[in-house]
Image: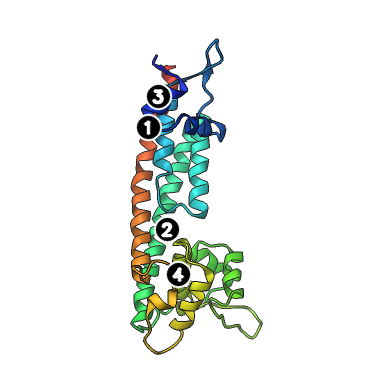
Amino acid sequence: MTTYRTIDLAREAGLHPNTIRFYEEIGFLTKPMRAQNNYRVYTALQLEQVKFVRLALRAEVLQGGLRKQVIRILHLSADCCFEEALRQADRYIAMLTREIELALHAADSVEAILHRNEPPATPPLTRRETARTLDITVDTLRNWELNGLIQIRRLQNGYRVYDGADLERLSIIRTLRLANYSLTAILHLMNRLSCAEEFSVLEALNTPDPGDDIRSVCDHLVDALKSAKTDALALPALLKRMENFTTLQ
């Protein structure tokens, strides 16, 4: 059985030895054996785990639930709980698929609003139903409303309801938040979207990079999510390969 010292494992993986120690410390690697001199002794399992970590965390977009899901998978693989890790990897792929769908919808909403098309007819939704549709928390939705990003009408009983136009705007807000735009910049944009006159989206967003516009932001997010999904689709095979290493040891 091939074994590695910390420096050997780092060299094989193209990392600094401190990175290997850090991965072990935060629970991304199975605890190595120790030699008589107390030096760590790694095996092919840890080498595969290092590669697995780098692939899993390579994604440019891993906000919120996506990053938490990746961390869960990494901890499961380090604990050699491969059956559960495979289930969670499938769930992660499904989450990315859903994120891509939402980002594409937001991009379409951007085009519809900027060209003043009518929003799709959508039955009124409650706040909880709207949050579930957008895959956000009710607290997040409430925060956007409190910050003035969107104005919601109320029924006679005082309950808030969300229509197709609201969902379009909320999709845009969600996409821009995923792209790390500030609430202030998004508020500026949403205020301008509510006006009838033509305007510069660049000016409204007040982005730090003048080369970006709102459509390119949406497209960039979709590309980043698709790249993350490509990497995610490779994770199950790597998990099975690691599982095989454990049976050989």
Q: Residues within 10 Å of mark 2 (few under 14, many from 20)?
A: many
Residue placed at 53% from the left, 47% from the top? 68
Task: Give the alpha-carbon distance from disc 1 to disc 3, as whole Å.
Answer: 24 Å
Task: Identify the mark nearer the N-term, 4 or 1.
Answer: 1
The residue tagged 3 is 244
Q: Nearer the viewer, mark 4 or mark 3?
A: 4
Q: Earlier in the sequence, mark 1 or mark 2?
A: 1
Inter-mark Cα distance, 2 to 4: 11 Å
Q: Nearer the viewer, mark 4 or mark 1?
A: 1
Considering only order in the chain, which callout, 4 or 2, is on the residue closer to the N terminus?
2
Which mark sits nearer the N-terminus, 2 or 3? 2
Please state which amino acid type lies under the numbered disc 3. Answer: Asn
Q: Are marks 1 and 2 in contact (CB under 8 Å)?
A: no
Name the element at disc 4.
helix
Disc 4 + disc 1, Cβ < 8 Å:
no
Q: Amino acid at mark 1?
A: Gly
Q: Residue 171 shows which numbered tag?
A: 4
Pointer 4 and pointer 3: residues touching (CB < 8 Å)? Answer: no
Q: Position of residue 222 (x, y in %)?
A: 35, 60
Q: Nearer the viewer, mark 1 or mark 3?
A: 1
Quadrant of the image for the N terminus? top left
Res 15 quadrant in image: top left
Instruction: Residue at the far right: name it.
Output: 157
> Which of 227/84 is in front?
227
147 vs 110, left or right, is: right
Pointer 4 local density, CA inside 10 Å: few below 14, some 14–19, many at least 20: many
Gap in angstroms between the C-alphas marked 4 and 3: 43 Å
Residue tagged by mark 1?
Answer: 14
Q: Position of residue 137 (x, y in %)?
A: 57, 62
Residue type highlighted by circle 4: Ser
**Marks 4 and 1, how far apart in space?**
40 Å
Q: Which residue is mark 2?
A: 99
